[in-house]
Amino acid sequence: MRSVWLAQRELFPTKIVCVGRNYVEHVHELENVVPDEPVLFIKPNSAISHTIAPPPASGFHYEGEICFLFLDGKPVGVAPGLDLTNRTLQTQLKQKGLPWEKAKAFDGAAVLGTFRPFSGNFADLRMELERNGELVQQGSVRQMIFPPERLFQEIRRYFTLENGDIVMTGTPAGVGEYQPGDVFRGRIFLANRLVSEEVWKVEI
C-alpha cells in the first residue's frame, strides 16, 4: 500500500474522501450548480503520490486543497495536496450522468505533502498554491461552503475514517492545466503562521 507521513510517522491510508464544489467561485468557474449538501467522492490508496507524473494528454488539471489526516477518528494533521483531474473525461462522464472515478481516482491523482501536526481553530486555516512562481490559487476555510466540522459530520454518516485516512476539502478558483516541468509550491497557514509547505515538479 502507498503511504503518507505525519511528521516522522509513516501511515497507510485506506482511502481519501474528497469534497467537490466547496468554494463558490470554483463552482462558478466550472459552471456547476452550488450544492445544498457536501459532494463527496473517494480516491483509493493507489491514487496517492508524492510526485506528479506528466499528463498523458491535454485537459489534465491541478486543484490545490487543504488536506486533513485522521487518527482515532480525529483530524490530527494538515498538509497541502493536489487533486489531479482529467477534466476532459470528467466533463464527458458528467454529461452522461456517469461516475467520476476514471477522471478523479486514477493512479497518482492524489498528490500529497508531508502532514504536520495540527491543533487550533479550523477557521484560521488557509492555503496558497504557486505554479512556476506565480500564485494561482488561494482560499481559506472561511470561504468554504461547508467548513471542516460540517464535512467531517457528513462523511461519518457514510464512511468510517480509519487511521491514516485523508479528507481533501475542495479547491478554490484558479484551477488549470499543468505541463511537464511545471513546479508547484503548496502552503498551508494557520492565521499568518506557515504550518506546512511542499514543492512538487511535474516529471518530464
Image (tube, rainbow, N blue to C red):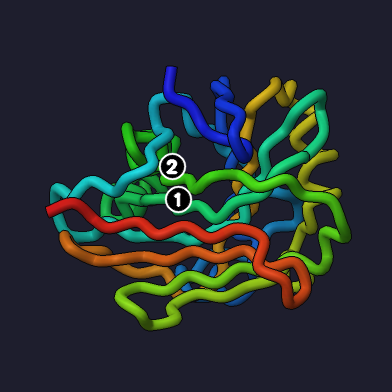
Answer above or below: position of 183 versus 160: below
Left or right, 144 with reference to 13:
right
Is 83 positioned to the left or the right of 142 in the image?
left
Label 2 sits on residue:
110
Q: Residue at x 63, y 73 (%)?
A: 139
In the rendered view, does 153 fall on the left or right side of 202? right
Q: Which residue is found at the position 23% from the left and 60% from the top?
A: 59
Kindly indicate the quadrant of the structure image that contains residue 138. Answer: bottom right
Asked whether 45 or 105 is in front, the reply is: 45
- The label on residue 122 is none
Mark 1 — residue? 83
At horizontal 84% and vertical 51% (from top left) the residue drawn is 119
- Residue 92 visible to the viewer: no
Q: Earlier in the sequence, mark 2 or mark 1?
A: 1
Q: Residue furthest top?
A: 1
Task: Pinpoint residue 173: horizontal percent, then vertical percent.
Answer: 52, 74
| C-beta proximity under 8 Å, tags 2 and 1 | yes
On screen, residue 112 above or below 71: below
Q: In the rendering, at what x and y percent does residue 151 appear? A: 77, 46
Classify residue 51 as left or right of residue 171: left
Residue 78 in the image, given as x and y percentages of width and height: 67, 49
Relative to 54, say whether 186 is above or below. Answer: below
Q: Determine the CA span between mark 2 and mark 1.
A: 5 Å
